[in-house]
Image (cartoon, rainbow, N blue to C red):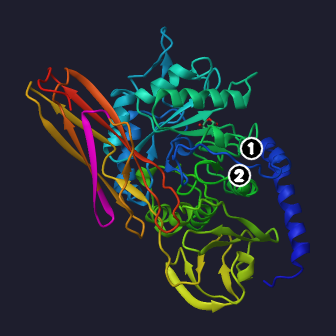
């Protein structure tokens, strides 16, 4: 296909996507098309969480509510580890609507022990011990969407304290049954309540674009849904998913480290989505710096689906420390060229996506993707895992129907992967018996699956006097040695959160804070002077 009359074609493309949005019948998407406006200067939270888009798994897309229980979530957790997705950076996992807690007479949330026999804290411990992070769900209104569970309205502080006691690391907060509530005030109250509860938690706002969260939510949360649900449970819908992608694309200016546009959980790997579509979907989510929350049944994935979801070269684009959301730089309504995503090493991420019914040959020039016309460039195909070049001026790509070619273009023949952190555990449990003072030690190991050796993680302040932590490294693996001194401690249970910070060495950008729990049980009073 030859590129002719780019201005005319772009105008037709814009008209077509406008028509598609109208045809979608999705009020949020439609109003968003008109109401996004210019990006205001965004003041994001400074808590160092979610500095790259969160990665994990949530049950809703494939399961809906009914089958969610402890057994299912644990099986998914095990599959997340055994499939290799954990090693590719996926970490947040837990129940969505399907937690099924109730509110007791004392106002506190109560676990449904029939569904979750180990309790919601027990489930969290299981997840943390696997080196994963615990994701939970609630609603900002009187009830959750199915009305099966209480929402947080008028119980914001006690619920956020309860989530902290369950040791949640990520809370998705829905916006059902919120009649008469002010959206900004409500999510601000929840954010303040969560901060007061004292646990670092990623807040995922879920108002499906209602209230235009991209305009204000960066101050009170880390990601916000921009679109309505990507599918009904169990029913992946390709056309609908693509409408979500193209709507979310328009909000590129609002995303950045610590604050992300969320076009919903992924349908990649779900029944009804072809291997080509899986790769295209994943390419789009990676280029848009969208949260990579898998929504398929991880226990029964095809080899191709695993290879797609665990493609570290594509994930590296998503997890780039600059955190820029890529966007469409040219389209004729059939072929779209996505770029505008410079990466930490100076390279550019590029997609050529074919929504037509026929294979297409597409040529783009370097300046269209932000590269000097005279530059000699190497091109890495992130699905074929092959490098070509050096090429000058531009390049031609062949794309099949539904296919997105995902490329990285660089003046260097080197395509480093940014940091992707994988922990052996996020929970250390120690126990002291006897009355003689002891020194107990336990290690937490954090590996970087990216290309570079990282500087040593810096331990934050505020550790309790009974705990000290040192960090050592062996190449890309760092070990956090935790030493507990029991001298002078009274019988009881002790808990600390160890937080560490780091800087990505190539870009100098702060990395997402890393944290884990240390718990200590002291079975009898211990003699000696406290440390
Ligand atoms: C909303 C959300 C979904 C899911 C359901 C649960 O529709 O957008 O992702 O959490 O609620 O009822």
Residue 475 in the image: above or below residue 112: below
Q: Does the stretch in magenta take in 56?
A: no
Look at the image and tell me in which quarter the N terminus lies. bottom right
Residue 110 can be seen, yes or no: yes
User: Quadrant of residue 209 in the image?
Assistant: top right
- Residue 467 located within the stretch drawn in magenta: yes
Does residue 21 appear to the left or right of 460 in the view shown? right
Instruction: Using the numbered discs, state the Cα–Cα distance from disc 1 to disc 2 in whole angstroms.
Output: 7 Å
- Residue found farthest to the top: 105
SS of the residue at dot 2? helix
According to the picture, the residue beneath numbered tag 1 turns out to be 215
Percent x, y of residue 381 = 56, 78
The image shows a total of numbered marks equal to: 2
Measured from the top left, where is residue 518 in percent x and y? Answer: 30, 37
**Residue 361 visible, this orientation:** no
The picture quadrant for ligand 1 comes to top right
Circles 1 and 2 in contact, beta carbons < 8 Å: yes
> Closest to the observer: 231 or 178?
178
Label 1 or label 2, whichever comes before in sequence order? 1
Residue highlighted by disc 2: 254
Query: Which quadrant of the rendered structure holds the C terminus?
Result: top left
Asked if 272 appears above or below 190 in the picture, the reply is below
Magenta stretch, main secondary structure, is: strand
Residue 517, how many percent across, how many down? Answer: 34, 38
Residue 470 image point, x, y percent? 27, 50
Q: Which residues are magenta?
A: 464-478
In the displayed structure, 312 sits above or below 428; it is below
Q: Which residue sits at x=42%, y=43%?
A: 133
The front one of 25 and 91 is 91
């Amino acid at each position: 296909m030859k590129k002719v009359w780019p201005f005319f074609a772009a105008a037709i493309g814009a008209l077509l996507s406008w028509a598609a949005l109208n045809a979608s019948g999705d009020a949020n998407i439609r109003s968003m098309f008109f109401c996004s406006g210019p990006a205001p200067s965004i003041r994001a939270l400074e808590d160092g969480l979610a500095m790259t888009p969160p990665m994990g798994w949530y049950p809703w897309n494939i399961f809906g509510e009914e089958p969610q229980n402890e057994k299912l979530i644990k099986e998914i957790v095990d599959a997340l580890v055994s499939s290799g997705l954990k090693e590719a950076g996926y970490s947040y996992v837990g129940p969505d609507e399907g937690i099924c807690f109730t509110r007791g007479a004392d106002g506190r949330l109560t676990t449904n022990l029939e569904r979750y026999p180990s309790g919601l804290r027990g489930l969290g411990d299981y997840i943390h011990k696997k080196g994963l992070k615990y994701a939970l769900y609630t609603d900002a209104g009187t009830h959750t969407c199915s009305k099966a569970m209480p929402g947080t309205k008028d119980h914001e502080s006690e619920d956020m304290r309860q989530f902290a006691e369950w040791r949640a690391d990520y809370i998705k907060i829905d916006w059902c049954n919120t009649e008469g509530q002010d959206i900004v005030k409500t999510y601000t109250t929840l954010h303040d309540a969560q901060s007061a509860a004292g646990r670092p938690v990623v807040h995922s706002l879920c108002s499906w674009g209602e209230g235009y969260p991209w305009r204000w939510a960066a101050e009170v949360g880390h990601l916000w849904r921009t679109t309505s649900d990507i599918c009904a449970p169990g029913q992946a819908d390709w056309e609908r998913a693509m409408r979500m992608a193209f709507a979310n694309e328009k909000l590129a200016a609002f995303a950045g480290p610590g604050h992300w546009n969320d076009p919903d959980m992924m349908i990649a790997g779900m029944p009804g989505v072809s291997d080509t579509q899986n790769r295209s979907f994943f390419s789009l989510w990676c280029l848009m710096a969208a949260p990579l929350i898998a929504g398929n049944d991880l226990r029964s994935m095809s080899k191709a689906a695993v290879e797609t979801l665990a493609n570290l070269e594509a994930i590296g684009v998503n997890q780039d420390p600059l955190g820029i959301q890529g966007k469409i730089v040219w389209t004729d309504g059939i072929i779209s060229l996505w770029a505008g995503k410079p990466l930490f090493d100076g390279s550019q991420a590029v997609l050529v996506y074919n929504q037509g019914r026929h294979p297409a040959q597409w040529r783009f020039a370097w300046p269209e993707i932000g590269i000097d016309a005279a530059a000699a460039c190497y091109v890495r195909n992130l699905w074929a895992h092959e490098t070509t070049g050096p090429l000058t001026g531009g390049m031609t790509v062949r794309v099949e129907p539904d296919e997105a070619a995902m490329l990285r273009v660089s003046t260097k023949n080197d395509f480093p992967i940014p940091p992707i952190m994988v922990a052996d555990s996020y929970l250390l449990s120690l126990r002291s018996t006897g009355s003689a003072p002891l020194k107990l030690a336990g290690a937490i190991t954090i590996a970087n699956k990216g290309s570079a050796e990282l500087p040593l993680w810096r331990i934050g302040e505020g550790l309790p006097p009974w705990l000290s932590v040192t960090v050592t490294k062996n190449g890309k693996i760092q070990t956090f040695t935790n030493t507990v001194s029991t001298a002078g401690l009274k019988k009881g249970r002790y808990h600390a959160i160890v937080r560490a910070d780091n800087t990505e060495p190539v870009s100098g950008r702060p990395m997402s804070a890393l944290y884990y729990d240390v718990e200590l049980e002291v079975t009898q009073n211990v003699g000696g002077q406290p440390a």
